[in-house]
Image (spheres, grey):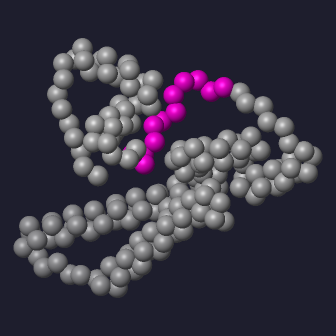
């Protein structure tokens, strides 16, 4: 995605920011204005919700309440949380995650960060060896093992994200 930037006076920036806050944010407003100027279809990235939350009352039959309790429990969510996530997913909000999915994603990010730290240490050691005139010895088995760990973590991340998107899109 391309980035467009421009300079405006501090006063114009402040006024635009205040107005944009009522329109889902500066980026969302600018995307919409550009799309309108070009008579292009509305951007797929939707505006962030604005305003304070309001209460909506919905009535369900007893059998539906049991079903809601079951599906929300399966996702590790409350009934209200599940209903809110369902509505938001249909309104185009970012993907909704259950607490278990949040935990899984955090674990994957932690593991990828550890791997990144290890790669930095390897690069630093290799650079130090080169600067000191020593040959850098590669341990291909260790590199292959690290590659497999990265591939496994990325596959888990893809599965988690695709599974979540499929669930909220009604494909699962």
Residue at image coords 76%, 51%: 72
Q: Is residue 37 left or right of residue 156?
A: left
Residue drawn at (19%, 70%) of the image: 126
Residue 149 lies, in percent from the top left, at: 44, 74
The magenta stretch spans residue 161:
no
Please say if 77 is above or below 153.
above
Q: Nearer the viewer, residue 25 or 106?
A: 25
User: Height in image: 142 above or below 4?
Assistant: below
Give the quadrant of residue 71: bottom right
Residue drawn at x 53%, y 44% is 93
Q: As drawn, is 38 to the left or to the right of 159?
A: left
Residue closest to the far front = 39
Please indicate, yes or no, whether residue 164 appears anywhere in the rendered image: no
- Decide which of 50, 146 is in the foreground and name it: 50
Specify the principal SS of the magenta part: loop
Question: On the picture, is 73 further left or further right than 131?
Answer: right
The x and y percentages for residue 172 are 66, 65
* Res. 27 image quadrant: top left
Image location (x, y in percent) of residue 116: 34, 62
Q: How many marks?
A: 0
Residue 69 spot, x, y in % from top left:
83, 50
Residue 22 visible, this angle:
yes
- Is residue 115 depicted above or below 151 in this figure? above
**Stretch in magenta:** 43-54
> Residue at the location (8% across, 67% down)?
131
Question: Outermost residue, bottom direction?
Answer: 141
């Amino acid at each position: 995605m391309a980035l467009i930037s421009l300079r405006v006076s501090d006063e114009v920036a402040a006024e635009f920011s205040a107005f944009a806050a009522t329109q889902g944010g500066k980026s969302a407003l600018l995307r919409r204005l550009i799309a309108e100027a070009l008579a292009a279809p509305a951007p797929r990235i939707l505006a962030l919700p604005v305003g304070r939350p309001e209460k909506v009352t919905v009535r369900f039959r007893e059998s539906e309440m049991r079903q809601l309790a079951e599906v929300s429990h399966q996702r590790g969510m409350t009934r209200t949380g599940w209903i809110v996530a369902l509505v938001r997913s249909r309104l185009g909000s970012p993907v909704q995650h259950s607490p278990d999915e949040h935990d899984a994603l955090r674990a994957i990010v932690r593991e990828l960060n550890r791997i990144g730290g290890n790669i930095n240490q390897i690069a630093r050691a290799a650079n130090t060896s080169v600067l000191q005139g020593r040959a850098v010895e590669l341990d291909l088995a260790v590199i292959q093992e690290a590659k497999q760990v990265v591939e496994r973590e990325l596959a888990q991340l893809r599965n988690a994200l695709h599974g979540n998107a499929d669930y909220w899109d009604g494909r699962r």
